[in-house]
Amino acid sequence: GVRVGCGTLKSGNMKTKSKGAKKGIKSKKRNYNVLNAVIGTYPDYDGDLVVSGDIEITFDEYAIDFRFNGKGLEAGCGPGCGVHIHTGTTCSDADLVGGHYWAPAGTEDPWMNDVTYYDSNSSGNAIGQFSIENGYLMEGNVGHAVVVHDSEGVRVGCGTLKSGNMKTKSKGAKKGIKSKKRNYNVLNAVIGTYPDYAGNLI
């Protein structure tokens, strides 16, 4: 097991390059930013679903890596069951959640495409991942609502995006139904060549 790469784990947002690169070979600088949201039942939703889950979004400038883990969803939902960032910054008032969030105004809605959807199994559980750009950096997405839809487009789940470490519960849960508290901690590492490695790999 020859050691060919190395990097140190750092918490929170970071912009760094590995110190282990060979002399004369620079590792590419990257800016890592992560937002999380805890999903609860959509405000004023009166259907039979009790949705819960979490969202993790990683930003590389404008590029978004969107990951969704959900439970209590419509069984066998998809393709066509959407999960999107919305203009509102609350999950407490359905009138303030708003529509899809993107920029610049007048351009095609990036949330209306073939990737911003999830597929649930027969038990109503879903794990999904997709990549998208909505025209905003991480800072422009902080605090915005993420909305989960069923196959008819009904809003069944909601959570607001928060940065860094967080311990929270969704405000959108039905009365009498408590969302599970979660503690989020994110570590990142940029890998460069292992110190004193003399092989041909870079």
Image (tube, rainbow, N blue to C red):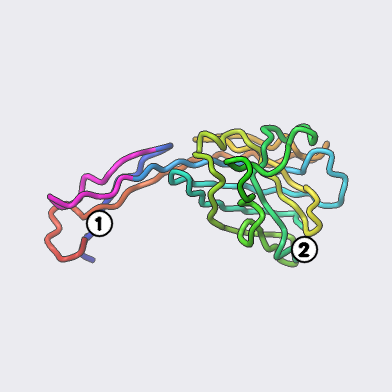
Find residue 176 and report its image quarter. top right
N-term-proximal mark, 2 vs 1: 1
Task: Tell me if I can see residue 165 in this picture.
Answer: no
Task: Tell me if I can see residue 163 in this picture.
Answer: yes
Q: Quadrant of the C terminus?
A: bottom left
Residue at image point 66% right, 58% down: 117
Q: Which residues are magenta?
A: 14-29
| 25 in magenta | yes
Residue at image point 43% right, 46% down: 60
Q: Which mark is residue 75?
A: 2
Percent position (x, y) of residue 20?
20, 49
Residue at image point 42% right, 37% down: 13
Q: Which kind of residue does numbered mark 1 sit on?
A: Gly
Identify the residue position indicated by label 1 in the image: 5
> In the displayed image of the protein, which residue is found farthest to the front?
106
As rendered, which of 181 and 18 lies closer to the eye?
A: 18
- The vertical placement of 74 against 147, above or below, is below
